[in-house]
Amino acid sequence: MAESEADTPSTPIEFESKYFEFDGVRLPPFCRGKMEDISNFSLRSSDIWIVTYPKSGKQTSCTVVVAALTYCWAGSATSFM
């Protein structure tokens, strides 16, 4: 059993005691102490976020994004959409 599974509450009472709320969102225990840093993280207009589900082809998604950006930056196109 994974460590995160062992920490997962199995009853509503355990859920209430372990999970916490941050800006109206209920979060698991491993997020405690990290949410302030995440909420204060500064973003730039040039940042690109690649978000995928586990085991869904993250490497392929990253490769496609890099290829598209390289194509656009090379001057071959003004937009890839």
Image: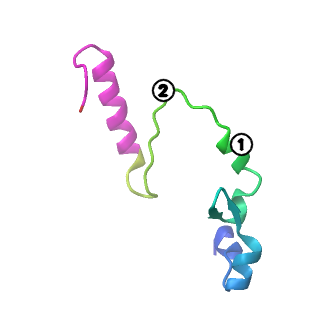
Question: Type of residue at label 1?
Answer: Asp
| Above or below 34: residue 63 | above
Residue at the extreme front: 24
Does dot 2 land on a helix, a strand or a loop?
Answer: loop
Magenta-colored stretch includes residue 49: no
Q: Residue at x 25, y 29 (%)?
A: 80
Quadrant showing the C terminus: top left
CA neighbours of label 2 inside 10 A, class few (<14), some (14 to 19), many (20+): few
Q: Of helix, strand and loop, which one carries label 1?
A: helix
Residue 68 as seen in the image, left or right of residue 38? left
Considering the whole magenta stretch, tell me its main secondary structure. Answer: helix
> Which quadrant would the N terminus be assigned to in this image?
bottom right
Distance of label 2 from label 1 (alpha carbons): 19 Å
Front-most of residues 47 and 2: 47
Residue under label 1: 37
Tell me if label 2 and label 1 are in contact, CB under 8 Å.
no
Residue 42, placed above or below residue 26: above
**Residue closer to the observer: 78 or 21:** 21
Question: What residue is rendered at 44% in x and 42% in y?
Answer: 50
Query: Of the residues under marks 2 and 1, which one precedes in the sequence?
Result: 1
Image-based side of 68 in relation to 50, left or right:
left
Residues in magenta, as a range = 59-80
**In this rendering, position of residue 36 left or right of residue 62:** right
Q: Residue furthest top?
A: 75
- The x, y position of residue 44, in whole percent, is 53, 27
Q: Position of residue 23 (x, y in %)?
A: 65, 56
Provide the residue designation for mark 2.
45
Above or below, 18 relative to 21: below
Viewer-proximal residue among 68 and 1: 68
Residue found at x 71% / y 73%: 7
